[in-house]
Amino acid sequence: MSSNAAAGATGRSIEDLTLEVNQEIRIRASLDVTFAALVEQLGTAFDTPDGQPMPMKLELRPGGRWYRDLGDENGHLWGHIQAVKRPTLLEITGPMFMSYPVASNIQWRLSEVDGGTLIIFHHTALGLIQSNHREGVGKGWSHIQESVRKRAESQQSGRKPTH
């Protein structure tokens, strides 16, 4: 189906139905320390850009879940681990924070570079993406990447993370 045919059927263009965020961050910490900081930030240390704690559970194995546990069998599934190759890759697929028809693929690729670690991050989504999510997603991921950087660099130097 052409994008014109899709637009006619839904009133939306293909650009309205897709989302793409690409980010790179350099971290002055080893690959292992950075990967551990990423896992911690996506789990128990997860928080919102305005500093509100929002601890998540991350079952770090293929097929494992990434979800918000609200207790008493309540919560919100963000995704499943599609691939993990410690300490160079974490890939998650699922709706993420969007509770409507959408599929996302998120990848953190870590590599050793001079002076530390480079994270290349990709979030690609397809679905009925709401404008508030489209507008806020870059800010949210930037907050997470910056939190990982601070956490890894403080752990590398033996300090506590400041946030």
Image (cartoon, helix red, strand yellow):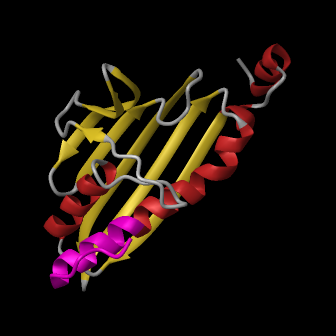
Residue 14 position, x and y percent, is: 72, 32
Q: Which residues are magenta?
A: 147-163
In this orientation, does residue 11 appear? yes
- From the image, which quarter does the C terminus lie in? bottom left
47 or 20: which is nearer to us?
A: 47
Residue 76 position, x and y percent, is: 42, 28
Would you place residue 70 above or below residue 25 in this image? above
| Quarter holding residue 105 | top left
Which residue is found at the position 21% from the left and 57% from the top? 88
- Left-right relation of 105 to 115: right
- Left-right relation of 139 to 156: right
- From the image, which quarter does the N terminus lie in? top right
Q: Residue reaching furthest front?
A: 72
60 or 22: which is nearer to us?
A: 60
* Residue 93 drawn in magenta: no
In this orientation, does residue 29 appear? no
Residue 42 position, x and y percent, is: 32, 50
Residue 101 position, x and y percent, is: 58, 21
**Number of residue marks:** 0
Determine the main secondary structure of the stretch shown in magenta: helix
| Quarter holding residue 69 | top left
* Residue 154 drawn in magenta: yes
Would you place residue 156 above or below residue 37 in this image? below
- Left-right relation of 104 to 138: left
Which residue is found at the position 15% from the left and 52% from the top? 86
Which residue is found at the position 28% from the left and 47% from the top? 43
Which residue is found at the position 20% from the left and 43% from the top? 84
